[in-house]
Image: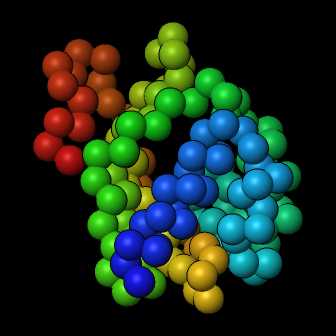
Amino acid sequence: MSTDCKDLVLTCLELYGKGDLDAVFPLLCDDYVDHGLPFRTTTKADWIVAARQLPLSALRIDIRRLVAEGDYVTMFSRRWLPGGALDIAVADVFRLRDGLIAERWEIVEPIPAESPNPVATL
């Protein structure tokens, strides 16, 4: 089960990173809740509307750790936009239900420009 959960989250992130939200849509529960910024949504339809406003094709995601336990997947990553407009370390927790992503929480920490090795210990 843990491998399936990790694979589902990785597939979702790959499609998200390509900006293919139509392919992400069936991976989410109808009542998908996203507690993270900038979303704060309570349905997958609302989430898709919010996600379409983001520069997904420019966003880079470097996954440092992906851990699954039961119906939860925790991911530590670095995300940035080329040119320095965004550079953050992120901890996400995904909750899965019935083979779909049901909920997501995140903690975001800006990475200082002078950081020699961002998120090296993740």
Q: Position of residue 35 (x, y in %)?
A: 59, 66
Question: In terms of image quadrants, where is residue 52?
Answer: top right
> Is residue 49 placed above or below 26 in the rendered structure?
above
User: Is residue 44 visible from the viewing direction of this image?
Assistant: yes
116 to the left or right of 66: left
What residue is rendered at 60% in x and 73% in y? Answer: 101
Please, is residue 85 above or below residue 111 in the view? above
| Residue 23 placement, left or right of 67 | right
Q: Residue at x 37, y 78 (%)?
A: 2
Residue 3 is situated, as x and y percent measured from the top left of the image, at 38, 72
62 over 46 or under it: above or below: above
Which residue is more in the foreground, 25 or 108? 25
Horizontal arrangement in the rendering, residue 42 relative to residue 73 (left or right): right
Q: How many marks?
A: 0
Asked if residue 93 can be seen in this view, the reply is no
User: Which quarter of the figure has residue 40?
Assistant: bottom right
- Quarter residue 48 falls in: bottom right
Residue sitting farthest toward the top? 83
Q: Please state, as top left, top right, bottom left or bottom right, where the N terminus lies in the image.
A: bottom left
From the viewer's side, name the closer residue of 3 and 62.
Answer: 3
Vertical placement of residue 103 versus 88, above or below: below
The residue positioned 17% from the left and 36% from the top of the image is 120
Front residue of 51/8: it is 8
Q: Position of residue 80 (x, y in %)?
A: 47, 28
